[in-house]
Amino acid sequence: LAQFTCLDVPSRVPVAVTGDLIEWQWVMTRSGNPPPGAELWWQWELITNSGETITTPRQTLAFADGRFNWQVVSADGIHVHWYKGDEVGPILLDAAVSGLQTLENDMGIELQSDVHFYIYGTSQDMRDAVLYIQDWAGGVAFNEYNIILMGVPPDIAESWGTGTVRHELAHLVLGQFGQSCIGGHRPTWLEEGLAMVVEGDPDSQTTSDLQNGIKNDSFAPLRSLNGAFPAHDSAASMAYSQSYSVVKFLLDTYGQKALQTFILTLANGEGYDEALTAVYHLNTDQLENNWRASLGLPPRQIPPTPTPLSAAQIPTIAPPALPQSVPTPPSAAASPSNTPSPSTSTCNLGLIPLLLLSIFGWRWKRP
């Protein structure tokens, strides 16, 4: 199913044969459904009474949303699918391409695989295409498929859609560049700050946040932005703005090569402080104080770190990837899938009566 996996291990489902027709049902109310644009493959492996193994040719199926007449525009490995508003597709494609150029030219981070945006005319249209996403979501990123669904009404395509497309593209391309099969993670301030830089020049809210943070010395400790950002509107806005400023400081002071090395070091499983020290010879607190000094602020007084208690290591299994949600704008939505090749079937998502998928059609003669 997914375009990126660390280990290609197909699911195996034993099926009892009660005739000459084999059938298996995928109940998506339990698992959720892949996004529009995703493809899956399957094949049958039959073991006869005599022990002979017969493997059928591989078949593929593309998930599509047939409720709308989709158009598509493409450039530089980015494909924008949309159905509402003549100029929405070209406007958002231009925004995505400019964001990709920023990633490549300013950060040296290149697109590894094609990305597909599916742009819905309303957020409700988008939510009707995918099971189990938040009611408030205006977009969903399925990083493992390189697919982003967004709800962008035509009247806010230029004001809200362009920046959001660049922001979400940055997350996806950064994820491709820093793919990790050993549990590597990036601090949230790096993830969101980099995406904010790709959006372009800071907007009035970001500028105001930074001015107030400098005037009142009210920035949060950078270490507190390693994880989840605050939920409160004003504190969340400040966290994004501060992250933008810190990443901009890293780029302006140390250059793109160091940033690339930092991202790859994190992907190799190093901790945040260990990766910072290896690349920048600074830990998180020292980075924060260097950044604060660049703004004319005094260093933050960091309390001594207590001696950690030793604990037995417990192996863990990484949870399955979940789609990331994008907040809903003053109205928003998501998107569909490509027309498959002649050897590809199409599954029409409709309004999610896609509650189960039946795979069948293989008839064979018993020996």
Image: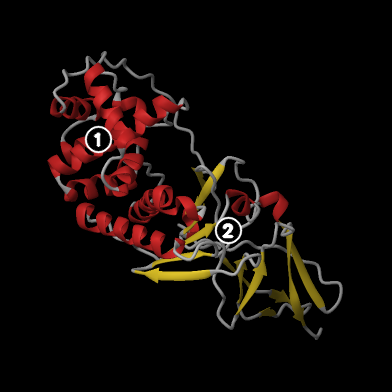
340 with respect to 101 (left or right) = right
- Name the mark on residue 123: none
* C-alpha span from label 2 to label 1: 34 Å
260 with respect to 236 (left or right) = left
Local secondary structure at mark 2? loop
| Residues at discs 2 and 1 in contact (Cβ within 8 Å) | no
Can the viewer see residue 315?
yes
- Residue at image coords 18%, 49%: 256
- Quick one: which residue is furthest to the front in this view? 155
- Quick one: which residue is furthest to the right in this view? 18
In the rendering, at what x and y percent does residue 178 appear?
34, 51
For label 1, the crowd category at 10 Å Cα-Cα, with few meaning under 14, some 14 to 19 and many 20 or more, is many
Reading the image, the residue beneath label 1 is 245
- Name the mark on residue 35: 2
Q: Type of residue at label 2?
A: Pro
Q: Give the tally of numbered discs.
A: 2
Q: Type of residue at label 1?
A: Ser
Quadrant of res 227: top left
For label 2, the crowd category at 10 Å Cα-Cα, with few meaning under 14, some 14 to 19 and many 20 or more, is many
Can the viewer see residue 321?
no
In the rendering, at what x and y percent does residue 287 appear?
20, 30
Give above or below for 147 relative to 57: above
Front residue of 313 and 175: 175
